[in-house]
Amino acid sequence: MIRRIYSKLFGKAASQDIITQLRERGVTIGSNVDIIDSYIDGCHGRLISIGDNVTITGARILAHDASTKKFLGYTKIGFVKIGSNVFIGNGAIVLPGTTVGNNVIIGAGAIIASDVPDNSVMIGNPARKLCSCDEYIERNRQRLNSADAYVSEILFCERTEEQWAALKNDLSVKKYGFDV
């Protein structure tokens, strides 16, 4: 689905081109990975690994920290390992020397400066655990199935102006919304 959206907006090969470039810089990237409008530290790419089924959108993944360069003459570096089944939201920053476990959601704007355990939802700056990933998905599954939820089956980039107007009207009275 994400590839379908991305290809509609930016062209079919855009996401794959980014992944190919990162692999050429030494980043280890698993299968079914989407990297959208994000910065992955290609200068130290060999220190970064990304598992399978990962979406990184509008985020920064850093394997180096130059804060010490002017003072010590050296830049701090560290491995960054991102597990499988991970979502990293817009504006999030993953700092060097961190491991993000499997089945993890990192919320928009979160700063990850220490290891994230498996099955976690992390939010904030500095990031803190909100709940388990299982709890978060179940809570949203219940919302999705509630009478208060607006559910759209139309991909946002394929909506007509009339469909957008209907969606806005429906969301003004429904408590929750979910898009395809």
Image: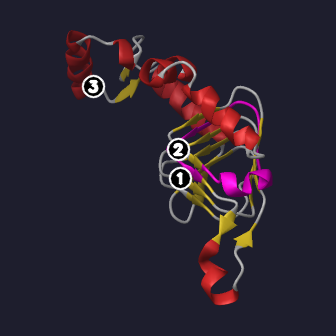
Residue 162: x, y in percent? 20, 10
Instruction: Label 3: state its secondary structure.
Output: helix
Horizontal side of 175 relative to 125 (left or right) equals: left
Residue 155 belongs to the span the image colors magenta: no
User: Which residue is labeled 3 in the image?
Assistant: 171
What is the quadrant of the N terminus in the image?
A: top right
The residue lying at 23 percent from left, 23 percent from top is: 168
Magenta stretch: give its range. Answer: 40-60
Q: Identify the residue under disc 1.
A: 92
Res 169 visible:
yes
Q: Are marks 2 and 1 in contact (CB under 8 Å)?
A: yes
Q: Is residue 25 above or below residue 7?
A: below
> Counting other residues with Cα less than 10 Å from the Cα at mark 3, is it few (<14), some (14-19), or many (20 or more)?
some
Q: Nearer the viewer, residue 157 or 12?
A: 12
The type of residue carrying mark 1 is: Ala
Taking 29 as reference, is 106 above or below it? below
Q: Seen in the image, is 69 located left or right of residue 49?
A: left
Return the residue nearer the eye: 27 or 73: 73
| Structural distance between the alpha carbons of marks 2 and 1 | 6 Å
Q: Residue at x 50, y 24 (%)?
A: 6
Q: Please tell me in which quadrant of the rendered image residue 44 appears.
A: bottom right
Q: Looking at this rendering, what residue extends furthest in the bottom direction?
A: 71
Q: Secondary structure at mark 1?
A: loop
Q: Circles 1 and 3: CB distance less than 8 Å? A: no
Q: Is residue 53 above or below residue 63?
A: above
Residue drawn at x 52%, y 31% as measured from the top left: 140
Give, as a three-letter code, the residue at label 3: Leu
Give residue 89's mark. Answer: 2
Disc 2 from disc 3: Cα separation:
23 Å
- Residue 102 appears in the rendering: no
Dot placed on the residue nearer the N-terminal end, 1 or 3: 1
| Mark 2–mark 3 CB contact (< 8 Å) | no
